[in-house]
Image (spheres, rainbow, N blue to C red):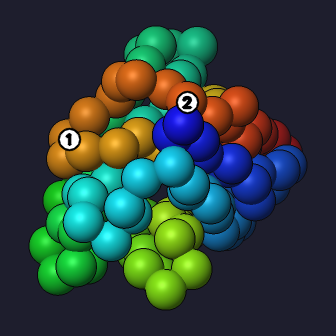
């Protein structure tokens, strides 16, 4: 069974940083592209970033380019999202998703990011 456990969210002030993690199981992680998606009050479910299976290729939605970095550790079956210079609009629940440029299906509980001064 495919499972994801997202963690690392929390409360941060605008301009702050967080590092999200997603522990994956139930499939061959190293063979799959992966994505981060987020659910926000303003935009609903939104794709954020994707990474190729070997980590050599990444892509981002325009609003996070230059601020977020997606990465992975295939030895640990773990996906990461480093988020810097966080903005109010980044607040929401973040999910990892199997596949490239995907927002569905969501198989984890997500991790809440709150941006507040």
Numbered-mark total: 2
Kindly identify the residue that appears in the image at 54 percent across and 37 percent down.
1
Q: Which mark is residue 40?
A: none
Q: Residue 20, can we see it?
A: yes
User: Is 51 drawn above or below residue 114 in the view shown?
Assistant: below
Closer-to-camera residue (98/101) = 98
Which residue was labeled with disc 1?
Answer: 101
Kindly identify the residue that appears in the image at 49 percent across and 26 percent down.
106
Label 2 secondary element: loop
Q: Crowding near pointer 1: few (<14 within 10 Å), some, many (20+)?
A: many
Q: For residue 50, what is the image quadrant?
A: bottom left
User: Is 9 situated left or right of 57 in this image?
Assistant: right
Image quarter where the C terminus lies is top right
- Residue 104 point in image, percent of width and height: 36, 24
User: Is 80 drawn above or below residue 11 in the view shown?
Assistant: below
Which residue was labeled with disc 2?
Answer: 107
> Cα distance, mark 1 to mark 2?
16 Å
Closer-to-camera residue (34/94) = 34
- Residue 48 point in image, percent of width and height: 35, 44
């Amino acid at each position: 069974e495919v499972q994801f456990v997202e963690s690392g969210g929390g409360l941060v002030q605008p301009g702050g940083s967080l590092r999200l993690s997603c522990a994956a199981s139930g499939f061959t992680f190293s063979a799959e592209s992966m994505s981060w998606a987020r659910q926000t009050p303003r935009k609903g479910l939104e794709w954020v970033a994707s990474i190729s299976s070997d980590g050599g290729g990444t892509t981002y939605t325009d609003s996070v380019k230059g601020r977020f970095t997606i990465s992975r550790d295939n030895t640990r079956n773990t996906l990461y999202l480093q988020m810097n210079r966080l903005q109010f609009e980044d607040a929401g629940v973040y999910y990892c998703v199997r596949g490239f440029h995907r927002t569905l299906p969501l198989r984890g509980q997500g991790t809440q990011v709150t941006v507040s001064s």
